[in-house]
Amino acid sequence: MAKDGSKSGWKEFIWNPRTREFCGRTASSWGLILLFYLAFYIFLAGLFSVTIYVMLLTLDDNKPTYQDRLATPGMMIRPTGTDLEIIYKKEDTESWESHVQALNNFLSTYNDSVQEQTNVECTPDNYFFQEDSDSVKNIPKRSCQFKRSMLADCSGTPDRFYGYQEGTPCIIIKLNRVIGMLPGKDGLAPAVSCGPKGDDSDKIGEVAYFPPNGTFNLMYFPYYGKKAQVNYSQPLVAVKFLNITLNTDVNVECKISGMRIQANNERDKFAGRVSFKLRINSNK
Ligand SMILES: *[C@@H]1O[C@H](CO)[C@@H](O)[C@H](O)[C@H]1NC(C)=O
Ligand SMILES: *[C@@H]1O[C@H](CO)[C@@H](O)[C@H](O)[C@H]1NC(C)=O
Ligand SMILES: *[C@@H]1O[C@H](CO)[C@@H](O)[C@H](O)[C@H]1NC(C)=O
Ligand SMILES: *[C@@H]1O[C@H](CO)[C@@H](O)[C@H](O)[C@H]1NC(C)=O
């Protein structure tokens, strides 16, 4: 009897023919609930779309809205060697061939003819501003020529081995791109200077810089981003070690100076400097 009762109770809960209720609710009650949820979800979807749309409106295609602003950007060398260790033997062509090849590859986009085709000649020693006005976007933006011939003894012509064969190798330094950076200080361009790291002071010998004084000319700044400034070529500085001590490890540190640098920057101790090991072996 009790069994029967609960069974019919269940049946009646699911469908009660007397009150015409399904699961305890009439058809109109169910209808109202569905209607409510429908309206609720449409509202949520609408809110979501509006939020995304408004957010997209505030973004600029060509410029990051938020950028980790480093006071000084990172620096990199070419060739990179293995873990920033450039080790070779003067008399062993195979030991330095890959470095020469790396420099050839890296500099190929800096060929004078390539630069003349893609970039414009700029007025040196001034920033090359190409700002957008309110109504017109100044796009695409032009970029200044950096010709490899400016690297003179480190340009690959006429010395196509960049000094590696003679034990006076060239190392090329580039500054990482930072959108909008104006690196000059008191109207002066930033410059690279290399010196011994640690107690290797007498081993490094004389060093020559190309372009003269190791400067990154101001005309290559500011950089407007890959999308706005498609043909941008980062300026380079080449360092040639003229009288480095052979058959010994020489630890070198190159720094950028004349820039609004924060010495020993807490956030990034590699900003504005790069260290590497140079070892040139020789039978002599
Ligand atoms: C760059 O110029 C050198 C000779 O100056 C040539 O051998 C090389 O093929 C050129 N590279 C490009 C990419 O044009
Ligand atoms: C980029 O270089 C190409 C040639 O490679 C040239 O046609 C184009 O005008 C250049 N763009 C700008 C903005 O200078
Ligand atoms: C290099 O620096 C020296 C002294 O700081 C300066 O007299 C000379 O004009 C500079 N050369 C170039 C090409 O900037
Ligand atoms: C090269 O360096 C050595 C010491 O490592 C020094 O005795 C010599 O005078 C230097 N040569 C030149 C041309 O500076």
Image: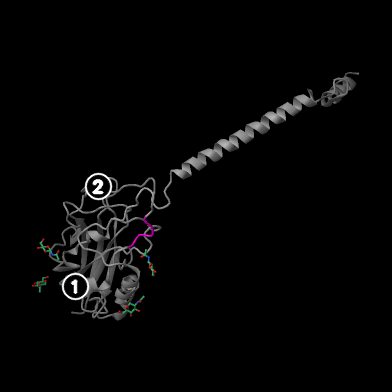
Query: Which secondary structure, mark 1?
Result: loop
Q: Which mark is residue 78?
A: none
Q: Quadrant of residue 228?
A: bottom left
Report x, y in % for residue 41. Answer: 63, 34
Q: Residue at x 26, y 62 (%)?
A: 276
Q: Earlier in the sequence, mark 2 or mark 1?
A: 1
Q: Quadrant of residue 11?
A: top right
Residue 171 lies in magenta, yes or no?
A: no
Q: Which mark is residue 265?
A: 2
* Ligand 1 location (quadrant): bottom left
Amino acid bearing label 2: Asn
Query: Which secondary structure, mark 2?
Result: loop
Q: Residues within 10 Å of mark 1 (few under 14, many from 20)?
A: some
Amino acid bearing label 1: Leu
Decide if residue 169 is in sight here. no
Report x, y in % for residue 84. Answer: 30, 63
Report x, y in % for residue 244. Answer: 17, 70
Q: Is mark 1 within 8 Å of ligand 4?
A: no
Quarter of the picture containing the C terminus is bottom left
Q: Is residue 158 left or right of residue 31?
A: left
Task: Identify the residue under disc 1.
Answer: 246
| Mark whose residue sits in front, 2 or 1 | 2
- For the record, the magenta segment spans 138-142
Q: Is residue 259 left or right of residue 67?
A: left
Q: Quadrant of residue 247?
A: bottom left
Whether residue 178 is situated above or below residue 16 in the rendered picture: below
